[in-house]
Image: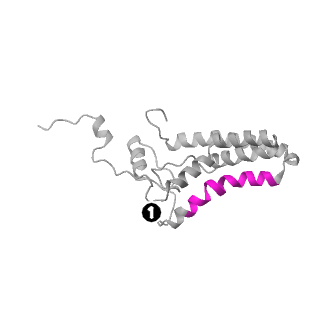
């Protein structure tokens, strides 16, 4: 929400996703407008390689883990492959080596779709690889008086990779002076 509070409420998260839906709409329009100009074999490969490298290995590891932490390498693969910076470099390299072409539109189409439609952004080591409601976030929403988002169901309760035990003193108690006992 800001530099001092780098988290999102359900409302700001929805607004953030909406911005990517605009990008998805633009790329979809361009794909439709240039349907006949797209080389479909490279387009399909470019669309799929992001998840083949960046998502599927981590999703398999997560499902096989039985709720235990998985390697941080899966998070790094996901974040690198789903980075607009990485994919811009791929597009630039493609344009330099092969030449610009309409098939490249599937790269922003993929990333904008992941973020706008599915709400998938970068993955934090502090959270499970797949979406799981975190009690700390739910408490934060309670403190802010905000309704909880819809639950995401999993058959297991995974432990985050970078799990840090909760400190005994809360940040709130440090910010609010306690009354002296009489």
Main SS class of the magenta portion in the image: helix
Q: Nearer the viewer, residue 20 or 105?
A: 105
- Pointer 1: what residue? 68
Q: Name the residue: 42% across, 45% down.
A: 141
The answer to which image quadrant residue 177 occupies is: top left
Q: Position of residue 60 (x, y in %)?
A: 57, 63
Q: Name the residue: 49% across, 65% down.
A: 65
Q: Residues within 10 Å of mark 1 (few under 14, many from 20)?
A: some
The quadrant of the rendering that contains the C terminus is top left
Q: Position of residue 38 (x, y in %)?
A: 84, 48
Q: Name the residue: 53% across, 41% down.
A: 11
Inspect this view and state whether residue 56 appears: yes
Asked if residue 38 lies in the magenta stretch, the reply is: no
Q: Nearer the viewer, residue 31 or 151?
A: 31
Q: Which element is circle 1 on?
A: loop
Q: Which residues are magenta?
A: 41-60
Q: Position of residue 28 (x, y in %)?
A: 76, 45
Q: Residue furthest top?
A: 3
Q: Name the residue: 31% across, 47% down.
A: 167
């Amino acid at each position: 929400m800001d530099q001092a509070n780098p988290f999102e409420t359900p409302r700001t998260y929805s607004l953030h996703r909406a911005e990517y839906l605009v990008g998805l709409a633009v790329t979809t329009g361009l794909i439709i407008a240039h349907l006949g100009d797209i080389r479909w074999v490279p387009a399909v490969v470019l669309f799929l390689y992001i998840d083949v490298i960046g998502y599927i290995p981590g999703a398999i590891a997560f499902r096989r883990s039985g709720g235990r932490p998985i390697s941080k390498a899966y998070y790094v693969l996901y974040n690198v492959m789903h980075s607009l910076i990485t994919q811009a470099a791929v597009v630039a390299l493609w344009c330099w080596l092969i030449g610009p072409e309409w098939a490249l539109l599937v790269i922003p189409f993929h990333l904008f779709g992941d973020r706008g439609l599915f709400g998938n952004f970068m993955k934090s080591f502090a959270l499970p690889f797949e979406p799981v409601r975190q009690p700390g976030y739910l408490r934060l929403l309670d403190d802010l008086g905000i309704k909880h988002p819809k639950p995401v169901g999993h058959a297991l309760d995974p432990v985050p990779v970078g799990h840090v035990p909760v400190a005994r003193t809360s940040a709130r108690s440090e910010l609010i002076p306690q009354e002296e006992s009489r």
